[in-house]
Amino acid sequence: MKLFIDRTFNFLLALIVLILLVIPISITFIFIKLSSRGPALYWSDRVGINNKIFKMPKFRSMKINSKADSMQATRNDKRLTKVGMFLRKTSIDEFPQFFNVLAGNMSVVGPRPHMIKENEKYLKTIDKFMVRHFIKPGITGLAQVNGYRGEIETNLDIVNRIKFDINYIENWSLLLDLKIIILTLFNSFKGEKKAY
């Protein structure tokens, strides 16, 4: 029953969001295409539930480069386009992931999926790292609204991210999901230090 409620909530929320955002999403496509060469969407292989690989789309925020699948965006990253900086600052680059939610390989809330190379690195060095793969990854998560989003600059960043991910898994409820969604919206409007 819990899984049915969660899936229904995620499916309906993703559907509503995509309907409401159809015009902003279309405008974003146009701005990306006009501002730099390359596709409007960037597809990345990510690790999901039960360690399965899936394709995750984002609005392309960088110039085409060879390190897109292996190197996180960093502060003052030269690969970012001007439009891309705005998309990342406001988290608009994540909007296409609502299609993943409809498809059933992501949730609106859950542990953020890592790049494959990051996963390979941290599963060997961080205790309980693989616990985060017991549930579907999310567009946003408890770690993200508590300041542990984006670039992993120190070992403490990833350790605390995993702690929040496990805390979320152990204490999941629809009320917690709604709280995280509200905090995510608030942080998007307020701006976050690590949103780059």
Image: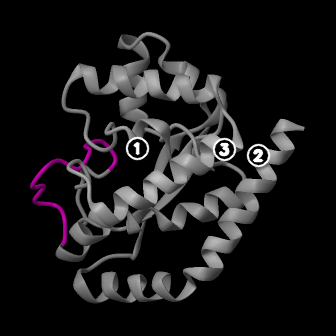
| For residue 105, side relative to residue 114 (left or right) | right
**Identity of the residue drawn at 83% across and 46% down:** 5
SS under mark 1: helix
Q: Which residue lies under the disc numbered 2? A: 6
Spatial CA span between label 1 and label 3:
15 Å
Spatial CA span between label 2 and label 3:
11 Å
Residues rendered magenta in the picture: 69-81
Of 65 and 27, the residue lying toward us: 27
Mark closer to the chain start, 2 or 1 = 2
Spatial CA span between label 2 and label 1:
20 Å
Q: Are marks 2 and 3 in contact (CB under 8 Å)?
A: no
Question: Which amino acid, by three-letter code, is at mark 2?
Answer: Asp
Question: Which amino acid, by three-letter code, is at mark 1?
Answer: Val
Q: Which residue lies under the disc numbered 1? A: 145
Mark closer to the chain start, 2 or 3 = 2
**Identity of the residue drawn at 71% across and 55% down:** 10
**Identity of the residue drawn at 24% across and 20% down:** 155
The quarter of the picture where the N terminus appears is top right
**Where 173 falls versus 69 (above or below)?**
above
**Where 103 falls versus 124 (above or below)?**
below
**Identity of the residue drawn at 21% across and 67% down:** 85
Mark closer to the chain start, 1 or 3 = 1
Q: Which residue lies under the disc numbered 3? A: 175
Mark in front: 1 vs 3: 3
Quarter of the view holding residue 146? top left
Question: Which amino acid, by three-letter code, is at mark 3?
Answer: Leu
